[in-house]
Image (cartoon, coloured by chain):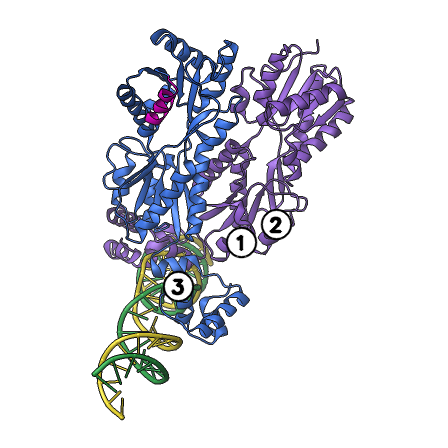
Chain colours: A purple, B blue, C green, D yellow
Amino acid sequence: MPTISDVARAAGVSMSTVSYVLSGRRPISAETSARVRAAIAELGYHPHAGARALASSRTSVLALVVPLRADVNVPVIMQFVTAVVTAARRYHHDVLLLTKDEGTAGLERVAGATMVDALIVMDVEGDDVRIPALGRLKQPSVLIGLPDDPAGIACVDLDFAATARECLAHLAGHGHHRVALVGPSPSVYERGTTYAQRFLDGFTDASAELGLETVAHSCEPGADGVRDCLAWIDSELPGTTALVVHNEDALVPLLDELRARGRSVPGDLSIVAVCPRDVATSLPVKLTSADIPAHDVGTLAVETAMALLEGRKAPGTRLLPPTIIERDSCGPLS
Amino acid sequence: MPTISDVARAAGVSMSTVSYVLSGRRPISAETSARVRAAIAELGYHPHAGARALASSRTSVLALVVPLRADVNVPVIMQFVTAVVTAARRYHHDVLLLTKDEGTAGLERVAGATMVDALIVMDVEGDDVRIPALGRLKQPSVLIGLPDDPAGIACVDLDFAATARECLAHLAGHGHHRVALVGPSPSVYERGTTYAQRFLDGFTDASAELGLETVAHSCEPGADGVRDCLAWIDSELPGTTALVVHNEDALVPLLDELRARGRSVPGDLSIVAVCPRDVATSLPVKLTSADIPAHDVGTLAVETAMALLEGRKAPGTRLLPPTIIERDSCGPLS
DNA sequence: AGTGATCGTCGAAGCGCTTCGACGATTAGG
DNA sequence: CCTAATCGTCGAAGCGCTTCGACGATCACT
């Protein structure tokens, strides 16, 4: 492996000149620069990441902490991950993958060892124990999600409250006034991730604002869970004409069950789903949906981290506005 | 951030002694060792990863290259990823995540910059262009999958040919002799990943060995794809009594379609699926399945990489034997 | 022509760690 | 009791890079 001094010798300049050509931190004449680049190409030189990190205390690596729980929506996580990796590369950064189960120790390990410049943490809970730990690190961090108290750490997420509001507004626009929320499974509410609660709060508030009659109920996984949930809705709010479904796993069994009961969508029942695009379009009925913009959120998390590294932008919370995509599952009240 | 010399001073020893306590590469007395460890704990010392990498030319990081194509099975990929990360941590390594779309350049970048000790590459194709590139790196690598010519690189995968054989043997054991393979979508065969072809070859060979009548057909995604595939099977091999399904996405629409046609499983038709455990058990009929041991393959890939790093074990190919898990979808020939 | 600025380059001092050779102090063997 | 091996520790030399101060050369104004 050639070193920077091999390049310097080959180009007939000093090491520092090579370094400045690479970093652009000082002006270098066009001819010198060209000679250096030629030498670099010819020798196949790559700066040694460790040496660079040691000398500059910058690593060009971002840590990304992902949940590996099974009850979480795996394809959505993967969308975040690829968005983060792809965006990071645009800023010449690589991504070190940590799992949530290492907890606080993992964060302290990679930050303490100066393995990363910044951290992006997914699946944060209401009172996540990792938040105080992140605050103690010398590296900045970005949360994907919204804890009860961000404690000065930057947060990025979809605005779930506004999303619920939009879903209801959309249905109200079609003339519906009895709407039920099919929520996530109870375990999602129990573990402290806040998005389910924020959605529910938004739903409740908007219901009042719009003067609708609504109920909300969590929905256990599987066909049985869906049946139970529908039964509950039937008894609590008879004459419900529309559903907001904030539960990806329930979608398939729900449509199955409605078909089995001979209830057509959107003829008898309108549905707005909260899910990624591809899920909404891959079902037998193309669902009108509020998009989960995993890609955008991941990208924004990286951009926020980069802004923090450059010292521009103070940490703060950034909630992305919802997007309703109209498809075939919402009709007028019949 | 305290450095090793802070620790040395606090413990009243030299830097090298601290280093030897940490690495265990030379004997250190119990008392000295204890004093050093106390100082480390008290100061909250973490060795600087870059400095360590520079001095030792070891990084304690593994590169993992994942595909981000959408047509690939995302949850299975995530299982590989978490298995790799978890196994790597057991060997005190971290994982740097690369995406396949960076291609050869990504490999050369992280290897050339000495960011990683070894590379694990998923989703390798028959004549993957990355293989010659990997051969040129100074770091060892492990492929998950089986290219036409591994060119001296270690490979790890499920033995798909043997898996096909086991599926057929299982069905033959139940008395079936007309069996159809519902294969992956044509795009899987077209792009060069070899597992689909290996499965098909194993299926064909075993069919002959066992004296069965079989047909095989790829299956486009979605309910329409399933219907077309079933129609094809009906016409090519009337009287088929069992299906081997090597296509996860087809499972749900397939069971739907069969139910719609009033064909019971396993009463009228037996099914062996090739898929991860959780998929097989989450369907309306618990499917007898050949397991996709993503976790084991990922773990083995890491262990192989570690063995390569330590110089024990020459690279070679390791194919995991299949496991058939009996559930409710196979019955005797009626 | 004289005076600052600015430009382009160099030399050298580290960044924090590992590792090799050296060396005194034990211990074992004859 | 002497020699040789072993044990436990230290000092110092790098690993490859960035960055700061310095310095001659060029340039733009008076």
Say which chain tag 3 marks.
B
Residue at the spot 75% in from the left edge and 30% down from the top edge: A205
Depth check, front residue: A308 or B162: B162
Measure the alpha-carbon separation of dots 3 and 2.
32 Å
Say which chain tag 1 marks.
A
* Most common secondary structure along the magenta stretch: helix
The image shows residue B329 at horizontal and vertical percentages of 47, 21
The quadrant in which residue B18 appears is bottom left
The quadrant in which residue A264 appears is top right
Tell me the number on the disc at residue A105. Answer: 1
Measure the alpha-carbon separation of dots 1 and 2.
12 Å
Residue at the spot 63% in from the left edge and 47% down from the top edge: A128
Tell me the number on the disc at residue B39. Answer: none
Depth check, front residue: B80 or A95: B80
Residue that label 2 marks = A131
The image shows residue A246 at horizontal and vertical percentages of 63, 27
Q: Element at badge 3?
A: helix
**Same chain for marks 3 and 1?**
no
Q: Which residues are magenta?
A: B164-175
Residue B265, relative to residue B323: is it above or below?
above
Which quadrant of the figure contains the C terminus of chain A? top right
